Amino acid sequence: MKEFNSDTCHKLLAATLKLISLKGYTGTTTREIASEAGVTEVTLFRHFGSKEKLFEEMLKRYSFLPELKELLPELEGNSSDYTEVLLTIGTRFFGTLKERKSLVRIMTCEIQLYPEKVRVVHSKFIDEMIQVLAGYFRLQQDKGLLRRFPSETAARAFLGMIFSFFHVEEIIKGRDMKKNEVKRTINEFVNILVQGTLRGDKS
């Protein structure tokens, strides 16, 4: 698998994030991305091959997915309890969405206008994030902490609650939510999930 860790790749991915956040995928050209990164368009294609691949690598680097992959083993290693793990995931996920607010706003508005290849990339990225969290739920089920339930459904429900909360309040209503309000709401989401998934003798 090709790695994209060179300084040129970093610059191209950062430029992609900046321009797509401002202009959207369809409104951003590879020439503009290359110019923003201070390289030629030929260099862009030599490193990434296509605009679609550049978009895919941007999602891999700047989305919540890489953080989630690192976070779960770290929390497990620190012997964090179930509630604490979910609180951390929910808080970090909301924080990433807020940090990438411009990108989230424009992508949710224009995703149906994207080429099929790009929609597939976006869909696979969401599915992978769900699978990573579902894997954590399955592990807790195997340990006997959680009752048996479809782990993917729980992962989709939890991430969906956080995303919907962010989208309605920050994108649709245009609010800049305070940390205390975010914390209070995420606590309630976590309580709902914990009460619905713990084994009866563990609650």
Image (cartoon, rainbow, N blue to C red):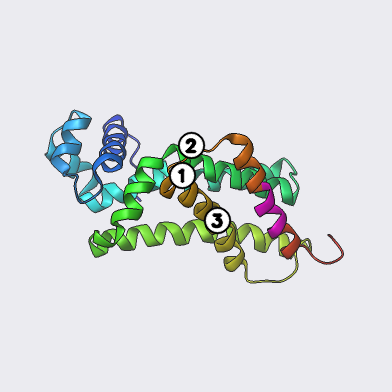
Which residue is labeled 1 in the image?
Answer: 170
Q: Earlier in the sequence, mark 2 or mark 1?
A: 1
Which residue is labeled 3 in the image?
Answer: 159
Judge left or right: residue 132 versus residue 16. Answer: right
User: Residue 130: x and y, percent?
Assistant: 52, 60
- Which is nearer the eye, 13 or 100? 100
Which residue is labeled 2 in the image?
Answer: 176
- Residue at 25%, 65% (x, y): give it: 116
Residue 60 appears in the rendering: yes
Judge left or right: residue 148 versus residue 4. Answer: right
Q: Which residues are magenta?
A: 187-192
The reply to whether callout 2 and callout 1 are in contact (CB within 8 Å) is: yes
Depth check, mark 1 against mark 3: the one in front is: 1
User: Residue 68: x and y, percent?
Assistant: 54, 47
What amino acid type is highlighted by mark number 2?
A: Asp
Quadrant, the C terminus: bottom right
Judge left or right: residue 168 versus residue 152. Answer: left
Whole-number angstrom distance, CA of label 3 to CA of label 2: 20 Å
- Other residues around mark 3 within 10 Å, as few (<14) / some (14–19) / many (≥20): many
Q: Earlier in the sequence, mark 3 or mark 2?
A: 3
Give the secondary structure at mark 2. Answer: loop
